[in-house]
Amino acid sequence: MTRRFFLILFCIIAAGAQASAQSKTTVVILVRHAEKATAPAADPPLTEAGVARARALATALADANVQAVITTELIRTRETARPLADALGLPLETVHTGTGDVHPRAVADAVRAHAGQTVLIVGHSNTIPLIIAALGGPKFTDICDTQYSNLFVLIVRSNDQKADLIVSSYGAPSPDPATTCPNSMK
């Protein structure tokens, strides 16, 4: 069976559990922006591979009941999220980048405003792990710069301090992190 099937099945189960439980369950799907160009350095758009990955994300999540999409103000996160948001008729909610734990906390607050829903977050290699931790998930290091295919599903229950994390992938496979980033998350 495909990973997409398991993701869809998981979201359906989570939604059903949410309806019957006293607490609200929020399904948070997190991805790093897709492959980016090298210029302009400050805010590059997606490459052709990145555009293809953004379309693959829209396909992978088409049936996942996404109800909100959160990005940063940067072009690469918005271009990664746009195909899915457009297909679902959802606006892109922007949480501006910041230093330290300001951005992860702001994203966590934005997710909490969608309690009981399924939320897609498109972030960056250094912010996705911090956002996961801010929502009660496990702590881990930044995502390797060569890794774009990671798809994280975080199950956040309103009555629990700890969230459950599922790590999957979507689109074209990223290079093996053991050879491109041996000290990073695998």
Image (cartoon, rainbow, N blue to C red):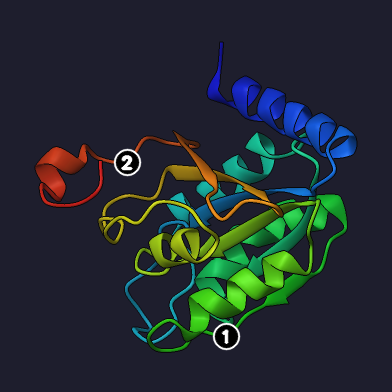
Above or below residue 7? Residue 113 is below
The residue labelled by disc 2 is 174
Amino acid type assigned to the residue bearing label 1 in the image: His
Above or below residue 183? Residue 36 is below
Q: Position of residue 40 (x, y in %)?
A: 38, 84
Q: Earlier in the sequence, mark 2 or mark 1?
A: 1
Q: Residues within 10 Å of mark 2 (few under 14, many from 20)?
A: some
Q: Residues within 10 Å of mark 1 (few under 14, many from 20)?
A: few
Residue 96 is labelled as 1
Q: Secondary structure at mark 2?
A: loop
Amino acid type assigned to the residue bearing label 2 in the image: Ser
The N terminus: image quadrant = top right
Foreground: 27 or 49?
27
The C terminus: image quadrant = top left
The residue depicted at 88 percent of the width and 33 percent of the height is: 20
The picture quadrant where one finds residue 92 is bottom right
Q: Position of residue 6 (x, y in %)?
A: 61, 22
